[in-house]
Amino acid sequence: MREYFRTERKADTVEEMAERFQELDIFGVILHNVSDSARGHKAPPNDWPADIVKRYPKQFAFFAGVDPWAGKLAVKEVERAVKDLGAIGLKLVPMMAEFFANEHRFYPIYEKCAELKIPVMFHSGTTGVGAGLPGGGGIRLKYCRPIPYFDDVACDFPELTVILAHPSFPWQDEQLAMAVHKKNVYFDISGWSPKYFSPNLIQYANTIIQDKVLFGSDYPMIYPERWLEAFDAAAFRPEVRPKILLENARKVLKLPI
């Protein structure tokens, strides 16, 4: 991952992370990823990111993670994470958990999220995980294509807010089409330095989907300072920048900041 993102920096401790975000005046959303069934290892419970938020409530919120293959247990965990731990959303990474999001066996998870009025975030496009390894380290990118997999979910659950994480290379235009076509679809632009954004992405963000685009750095792989420096140099319009950096997320995530 460090090689892919061209950084030698290692992750901060929780205390260092909180201090960094406070100094930068950035409110961070911690994303928890769970893929126990597919990857064969046990992820930390959602209590772990919840504890960070409890320690630093003015600096962080968190999206819970569940194993989509856990069935009813996954649905129960979503409810526990929201009602007992304070999660404000759910993060799913289909290429790590190895599932197609539009399979109806996973629909009870989205039904619960809609009931709880929290967004579902899907990792979309390629990934730095396994990048450059033989066979990509066993990671199959097909699970993270926006159309039809996430588009079907957004269509079948019009009351559910769907957020696609990252510019969805190599399917960026599919992601843009979804944001234009479906009122309940948003996406963040984390995971890429803005200097690599396509002209099409910037054009759409400056115009017809300027209320649909959310800031994110993909810390700790891309530190916020590096992302923001490149964002300053990118061709985003002055009136659009505050929307991307704060206003859109405050509205979509209902952040009291």
Image (spheres, rainbow, N blue to C red):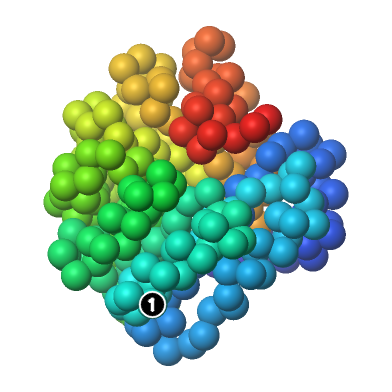
Image point 41% across, 70% down: which residue?
Answer: 76
Q: Quadrant of residue 229?
A: top right
Q: Quadrant of residue 160?
A: top left
Look at the picture and state if 140 lies above or below 224.
Answer: below
Determine the secondary structure under disc 1: helix
Look at the picture and state if 211 lies above or below 185.
Answer: above
Q: Is residue 249 left or right of residue 12?
A: left
Image point 41% across, 20% down: which residue?
Answer: 210
Image point 19% across, 55% down: which residue?
Answer: 149
Q: Which quadrant does the C terminus fall into?
A: top right
Image point 41% across, 22% down: which residue?
Answer: 211
Q: Position of residue 111 (x, y in %)?
A: 28, 55
Q: Position of residue 237 (x, y in %)?
A: 50, 13
**What's the residue type where badge 1 is placed?**
Leu
Q: To which residue does mark 1 refer?
A: 73
Q: Is residue 72 left or right of residue 154?
A: right
